[in-house]
Structures are given as structure tokens and as C-alpha cells.
Image (cartoon, helix red, strand yellow):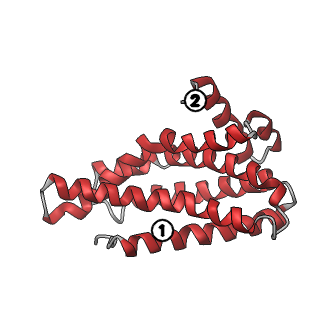
Amino acid sequence: MLASEEIQQSLSGAWRLMLGKPDGLRLLDLSADGFWNSFFAILVAAPALIVGWVGLANDFAVQSAEFNDRLNTVVSLALVDISAWIVPLVVFALVARRAGVGDRFVHYVVASNWTSAIIAWLMLPAALLHMLLPDDSQGFGSLLSLALFGLSMALTWRMTNAAIGKGAAIGSAVFASLFVVSLIALLAMKSLLGISVPN
């Protein structure tokens, strides 16, 4: 269990990286313990993620009012999101050295984990709005979700460039590659678990 000061420092470091400031790495624990502790960011992100899962579970459960059905859907959505979080990091571990960025693997993983926690909270307003206005599929909620997604991608790209530290071309290649891997993991898990986006 990380102390609140350590969590705050890690989030501050990730935020600076998201603003494109490489000095944010100084606030991150890049030791072996810091590497594994950075996965605690999943728990930091969990409350915000749960709101999104519950909102989607409500959409799926329109035809069924059973609690067990909704709970199973929430668990399935959690597995999908956690897979999309973890699988790209595993793939990066396998290819980082061959891609010439092995020396930045720990930097990226630690920064990415804490950045993902911030992104989860950044997306919370859209998830809350979706829960409050579930029929607003073509309205303000969709525009807000799209805007926040675009912002999160821009901030994640900046974090990747700052954490990799080998120039925009290599940083952009890493960002694009891991985004594709994340998308593939997301779609594969949805297919495996039989999840389809409700109308």
C-alpha cells in the first residue's frame, strides 16, 4: 500500500510528463519497487472506472433488471479495460529492446501507469453525464466524451515523448504502436467475453 504522499508525487510527475515536461520523471520512482508499485495506479483509477462500467452495464441491462446480470457485465467490462491497460505494457516489454528503447522501458511503464490513472479521472465527467442522461447518445454527452478522448490522446502522446526521451519520431511510433495494441486487446476481450456495444 503506497502512502498518499507517494501517490500524489507520482501523479504530479505523470501530469508534468503529460504537459511535455521531461523533469516529471524526477518525481517518479524508477526503481524496481517503483516499477511494481506503479501498478497501484489501477486501484487509484478504479473509482472513476467503476462509474463508467456501471453506466455501460445499465445500458446492457435494459432488457434485464437482474442484479447478477449487471454485476457480471461490470466484471466483464473491468476485465476488458484492465486487459487494454496491461497487454500493451507486456507487448512493450517483449519488443522494447529490439526497438532500441529498452533503456526507457521502466520510465515508460511507470509514467504510463500513473498517466492512465489521471486519464481515468479526466474521463469521469463524461461517464457521470452518461449515467445521468443515458438517452443523450447524440447530444452533449457524446461531444464531451469525444473532446475528453481527444485531450487524453494528446496528453498521452506528450507523456510518451517525454518518457521515451528519444525524439518525437520515436516517441510517436511508440505511442501509435501501443495504441493499436491496446485497441486490439480491447476488441479481442470484448469478442471473447461476448460484449457488444448496445444501440
Task: Give x and y (percent) for residue 58.
Answer: 24, 56
Image quadrant in which the C terminus is located: bottom left
Mark closer to the observer (2, 1): 2
What is the quadrant of residue 76 in the picture?
Answer: bottom left
Q: Which residue lies at the image location 13% right of the left edge and 56% below the top edge?
A: 66
Give the residue type at disc 1. Leu
Q: Using the image, tell me which numbered label, if any, was put on residue 2.
A: 2
Task: Give x and y (percent) for residue 100.
Answer: 85, 66
Of pointers 2 and 1, the one earlier in the residue sequence: 2
Give the residue type at disc 2. Leu
Residue 153 vertical position relative to residue 50 in the rendered view, above or below: below
Q: Using the image, tell me which numbered label, if any, was put on residue 141.
A: none
Q: Nearer the viewer, residue 65 or 42?
A: 42
Q: Secondary structure at mark 1?
A: helix
Q: Residues within 10 Å of mark 1 (few under 14, many from 20)?
A: many
Q: Nearer the viewer, residue 195 or 129?
A: 195
Q: Which residue lies at the image location 32% right of the left edge and 73% below the top edge?
A: 194
Q: Nearer the viewer, residue 134 or 15?
A: 15
Q: Which residue lies at the image location 46% right of the left edge and 58% below the top edge?
A: 81
Label 2, label 1: how many angstroms apart (C-alpha)?
29 Å
Task: Give x and y (percent) for residue 137.
Answer: 33, 64
Q: Is residue 76 left or right of residue 112?
A: left
